[in-house]
Amino acid sequence: MINRFVVAKSNKIYGKPFCFQMIARSMSGCDAHRVVGALDHMPGKYARILKTLVDSAIANAMDKGIDGSLIVDEVVVGRGKYLKRIEFKGRGRVGTKYRPFSNIRVVLKNV
């Protein structure tokens, strides 16, 4: 039996890579449909974004004709660009506020 992989990528997602990585650690090695169910019940935007990405990977697997159970092989979260914005502070001071973006890749494996 040949293991076939399916990949879904999403770039330039507004959010901190660390927050995505906290959720992604619990996903790898689990059944893909179970992961979707678990992410459905998690609060916050990070779980919602990862859920749409796993749904996209499952749809890609169906388009390729991969049947059977799918397992989340790996979830790679990378750092994208950071936008710098001005943050005004008290007493006439000015600081820099960073707006982070992330790149995420989900790989599903056929078992």
Image: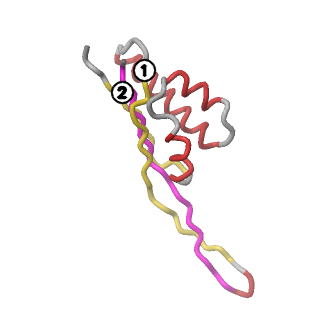
Pointer 1 local density, CA inside 10 Å: few below 14, some 14–19, many at least 20: many
Q: Nearer the viewer, residue 93 or 42?
A: 42
Q: Amino acid at mark 2?
A: Val
- Percent from the top left, x then y, of residue 41? 67, 31
Rendered image: mark on residue 6: 2
Q: Are marks 1 and 2 in contact (CB under 8 Å)?
A: yes
Above or below, 83 relative to 1: below
Q: Earlier in the sequence, mark 1 or mark 2?
A: 2
Q: Nearer the viewer, residue 69 or 81?
A: 69
**Magenta stretch in the rendered image:** 93-110
- Percent from the top left, x then y, of residue 100? 53, 58
Inspect the magenta stretch and tell me whether residue 47 lies in it: no
Inspect the magenta stretch and tell me whether residue 103 lies in it: yes
Q: Residue furthest left?
A: 2
Q: Judging from the image, what secondary structure is the residue with disc 2 in?
A: strand
Chief secondary structure of the magenta span? Answer: strand
Of the residues tagged 1 and 2, which is closer to the observer?
A: 1
Q: Quadrant of the C terminus?
A: top left
Q: Quadrant of residue 9?
A: top left
Residue on which the image places disc 1: 70
